[in-house]
Amino acid sequence: MVISEEQRRSNEALKERLLRKRAFREAGPVERPLAQLAATERKIAEDSSKNNKFFSKLSKGFSRSRPYLGAAAKGGAKFGGGATKVIVKGGMAAGSAAGSAASAAHEKIRDSDPGFVLFIAGMLVFAFNEYIDNYSLALIIATFFMFYSALTVFEKEGIVFVTLFFIWYVGLGGRYDIAFIRYYAFPLALAGMLVHGLVKKFRHTGTVAEGAIGELKGGAIPILLFIMDLGLIDLLLNYFKIPAAIINITFLKFVPWWGLLGIFTTRKDTTLITVLRVLAILYIISLIFVGVAPSAYGELKESVGTGPEELFQARLDAQKGIKPENPLTSYGTCLITGRLAELDVCVSEEQKKSLAKSACKNMGITSGAELDQCLKDELAKMERGGAKGTTDLSRKEFLTAEFMPVKDSFPRMVFNEPRKIYPATLLVKNPLQQQLGVEVNCKFTRGSVEIQGEVNINGEKKNRQVSSRKNDPLNILCQPSADLNGRYTFEIEAVLMDIVTTTTLTRALVKTQLDKERWEGEIKSTALAGFDSGLSRSADEFARLNYGFGNFPDDPIIIADRPVVLSASVEDLGKGQLKRIKSYTFSSFLEKGIAPASADDQNCLQRGEIVIPQKVRNYHLTECFLELTPEYKSFSLPFIVETFEAQLVYDYSLTQKVLGIQVEITLGK
Amino acid sequence: MNSKLILSALILSSLLFLGCGTGNQIGPEVDDSKTGVKELALSSDTFPQAVFANSQIQGTFTLKNNAGYDAENVQIKLLGLDRNYVELSYETESINILPGRSLFSKEGGEEIIAFRGTVKNLAKGADQNTQRYLVLVTYSSKVEFSPTVCVDSGLYLVGSNCNFKEIGAGGKKRPTPETFSGQGAPVAFNNLEIIPYTGTESEIELRMKVADRGRGQIKLLRLGRSALGSIPLQCEFHGKNVERPEGVIFNEKASSQEVDIVCSGKLESGVAYKTALFIELFYDYEFTESRTLEIRR
């Protein structure tokens, strides 16, 4: 079927109208109308010729192929008669229809409003976010949005960049170590920009520089939103090392990023759209100013993974763990209860209440008098807050342990081996050679089905090992105790037992307030120099005892003739979970005879086993007044300086999960 | 012949006179020990800057008195060494008297003070620890203010015995304070103002500003003898830190320590005359110097 001249002219006119419309929209405010008009006409002509070239080639192709198709039809008619003729003619018709359909589709896509589509889809996904607990689904959705926005909203400007990013993030596991970035990331990014620039140049639609910068701009936003949607928090915490206290996790968690991109890039210009945009801005501002994240448990830290799956899992874990409600919900509650005069106080209280409720739920307390008492206790702990500590960088030798990343040779897909043995390696470095126990467990889960595994450590059938060697890699093998058939998640847990972490705290003591005023400057420029010198310090191990001690726990200069208080908490720093606190001891205080001032606080300076809530980052441990000995109350010097030590003994759990283990059992083996 | 002889004798005696001098000095020796701002200083020390953990530590500090007055009850203390890592046998060492500079002791007194102790173990896993500490020196000394002044009761016109510029009775201009550059100590009399009282009796008031010009801090000021010629003066402290007129205690660390001394007395004569003023001021002083000690494993 040949496109008639009239139809062709009609299509062209339609194309021109659409091009004109788009060009005017892109031209921006009309400050120099004639110049804008000239530029617009030029653009229309260029686009028109580009499309005409494509479609004229398409038409020419079909025209050229007509004689051959006709000959084929004739030949077909010779050999097969009418049927072949119909098929070939039908093919020609389909091809031409496809051509015009493609043309129409191309116009339709251009003519449609991808921004609005993105807005609707993005808001729907955000609304049902709680139910997306499958990594693959979340990745598919985020990938779709990223490519969709790059192709339509940004009109392929950054498509090369986005593609390269996707390959890096999913295919290469999102490596962000310096070596990778130096050797691969920058060259690839530059290559992407160059490619786009050259394409633009050869198509005569712009210069190389325009293309390169367009690539960067058009790709940066979809990529950024993709990361924010899936796992920005981890990237900020662990790569850029931005302190958790600065990142407003509330802000990151409660913003519908794709929906926002859609509403601000939609081509519709109605009152409704304007209202929605204003509401979006107000929503973001409200989150920034109203959103609070109670600091009693510190900022929720996402666990570090090397790939997007782990990041997503960590986000899920955090979602399932202790978290406050959406701050705007708290805001609404305060409005309803009429606490308009003290909104800031009310919102903060509601956030703390929701966090306390979440903490109690996490401990399995959900109702009744037990819940009331739990809420009271958790709120009291939140008011007190966790003590702060810092890492002692001078301690270069300390215990480390981590699972080696899963290798490519890991049997993710297994045929006819329902009891396949799965390997893992736990690297333990123990330079101080402390006596350490390791207990390993493994399991395979699919939905509610859980199959335990039998553990083999370094060739021996056992799940526990005790060692004090400096380097002690554990080669672990896990064999399911029942037959596997289907898709499973392989999870291996190693509990490091009886880890001892020492924390030190430096204090200056003066006799009177006058001495403090006289010597404070000198003390803070010598013995207590440095902004964190008043904090307790420990090696960069899995968990640590944070404590403060003085007239006020955080004040590093103690006036000896005034009451002295001790406050301590335990902070989980590692990638896993603090399983159990075996004991803690303030050894320096005990050695020097510094004791609790009250007989009721005898357990303040040392205590045995303590169970702590799951995934709590900074858990308040103890608080009491102390009685200083005469040695610390009367001394000949204007001030004295001393460092005190405390030890924490605990068990720590590290976990490695491998998603998507597939075991296929083929019949008739 | 006689004239030639006389001339030769003159030349010879001149040569002998010049040749007997010490070096280029002509005239009697000048004692500048009591001028300017001078004080005690740590001239050198052998106290180590780095030591190993689990070892002994010892070293010395040399203290020199550059001031024009003896220093008494001198104490040197090491402040700020963490007792968990460094334990000194004695944290304070004392010197009874450290002589100041004078005509007979141009360099001033010098003493070497030794400290010794034990360096303990570092925290587990730590390879080094840097200690920042202070060397605190405290001492007692004095400063004497003894300028020659011209005093006038104001009853008579200026011009008889002193060379006043602006002094007189009956509403004429007050004398402008005279400034001084120090008396060879860290505590200095900065200026002096003479206020004559006009009346039937010849009285005079002297106002002085005393300030810390050294690199440390005044802890205490106490007045000693004060006289204008042979006439004793009654002197008192005045100023914001003054709680008692006879002495000043400085407890707070102030960016500038300054106090006024006001002395009053009767004049010997109604006529303007030159005489010596003498004010003796005792003070307790302290200064610090910072040091570091690195403990290595």
Image (cartoon, coloured by chain):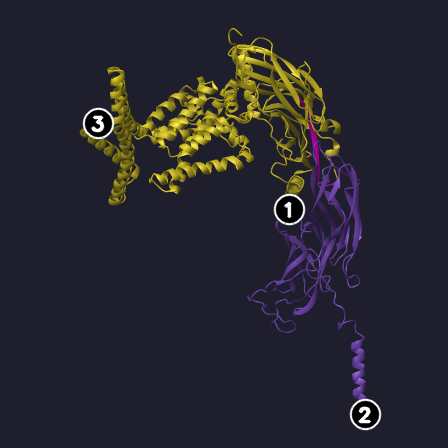
Chain colours: A yellow, B purple
Give the prevailing secondary structure in the magenta stretch: strand
Q: Secondary structure at mark 1?
A: loop
Q: Nearer the viewer, mark 3 or mark 2?
A: 3
- Residue A485: where, in percent of width, then height? 53, 10
Q: Secondary structure at mark 2?
A: helix
Q: Secondary structure at mark 3?
A: loop
Residue A638 included in the magenta stretch of the image: yes
In which quadrant is the C terminus of chain B drawn? Answer: top right
Q: Quadrant of residue A82?
A: top left
Q: Are marks 3 and 2 on the same chain?
A: no
Q: In the rendering, which numbered label is found on residue B253?
A: 1
For disc 2, the marked residue is B2
Q: Amino acid at mark 3?
A: Ile
Q: Chain of mark 2?
A: B
Mark 3 burial class by Cα count in 10 Å: few <14, some 14-19, many 20+? few
For disc 3, the marked residue is A3
Residue for point 72% across, 64% down: B32
